[in-house]
């Protein structure tokens, strides 16, 4: 399941929640949105998580997402759909955290697709970025679970807007740090300090 497709579905579901409220439709109908995620897709050759993630990580999330969609349709209950956001956070947490136990972190693998010649300073930096994203996904999972307990409106607001704003802050903060490192001469001119890979 491509990263952009998963995030698009994660954004679409909370938006559909408000549409369903406005039109008076049952939210569980949106289980249909998750069913296509089970269809196998080839990982592209671009700079993306899907291109460097383990093989199992490319199909398992889609199958689980489709299962959540089927559950919503069968039981006619939209609660299971709210857990899709939890699933996505846990999936990316597993991919990022799992890569820290390997020789190359996921962010390093992404960066090496742009430039194989990697200095030691860039290796350490990409590992710290990977750790930072792990913290983000842990926090995102906890907040999403809390929002589910609070109510559907809180869940839709956080997962349809707030979490994406926080993600944007993460990208912006990392970009500012790379700019500062570049000015100080650490890895100046190296692609990892110039461009952010796509999640």
Image: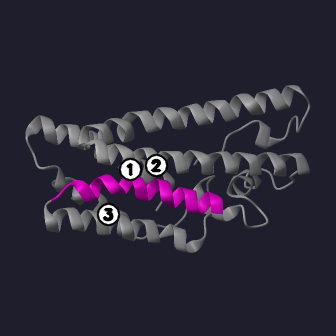
* Mark 2: secondary structure: helix
Q: How much space separates mark 2 and mark 1, taking CA atoms? A: 5 Å
Q: Quadrant of residue 22?
A: top left
Magenta span dominant secondary structure: helix
The percent position of residue 67, horizontal first and vertical second, equals 30, 69
Specify which label sits upstream in the sequence, 3 or 1: 3
Task: Relative to 42, say whether 49 is above or below.
Answer: above
Is residue 119 among the parts visible in the rendering? no
Q: Is residue 89 magenta?
A: yes
Q: How much space separates mark 2 and mark 3, taking CA atoms? A: 27 Å
Colour convention of the picture: one colour
Specify which label sits upstream in the sequence, 2 or 3: 3
Residue at x-position 32% and y-position 63%: 36
Residue at x-position 82% and y-position 56%: 116
The percent position of residue 39, horizontal first and vertical second, equals 37, 69
Looking at this view, is 155 or 174 the one in front?
155
Residue at x-position 25% and y-position 43%: 152
The residue beneath circle 3 is 36
Q: Residues within 10 Å of mark 1 (few under 14, many from 20)?
A: some
The residue beneath circle 2 is 142
């Amino acid at each position: 399941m491509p990263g952009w497709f998963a995030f698009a579905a994660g954004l679409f579901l909370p938006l559909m929640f408000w549409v369903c409220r406005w039109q008076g439709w049952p939210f569980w109908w949106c289980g249909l949105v998750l069913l296509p995620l089970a269809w196998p897709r080839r990982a592209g050759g671009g700079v993306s998580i899907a291109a460097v993630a383990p093989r199992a990580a490319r199909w398992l999330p889609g199958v689980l997402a489709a299962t959540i969609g089927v559950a919503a349709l069968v039981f006619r209950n939209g609660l299971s759909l709210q857990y899709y956001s939890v699933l996505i956070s846990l999936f990316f947490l597993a991919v990022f955290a799992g890569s820290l136990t390997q020789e190359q972190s996921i962010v390093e693998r992404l960066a090496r697709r742009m430039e194989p010649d990697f200095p030691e300073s860039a290796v350490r930096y990409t590992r710290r970025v990977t750790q930072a994203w792990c913290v983000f996904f842990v926090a995102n999972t906890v907040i999403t679970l809390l929002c589910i307990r609070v109510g559907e409106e809180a869940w839709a607001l956080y997962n349809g807007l707030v979490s994406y704003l926080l993600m944007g802050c993460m990208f912006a903060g990392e970009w500012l740090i790379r700019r500062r490192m570049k000015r100080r001469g650490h890895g100046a001119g190296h692609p990892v300090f110039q461009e952010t890979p796509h999640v």
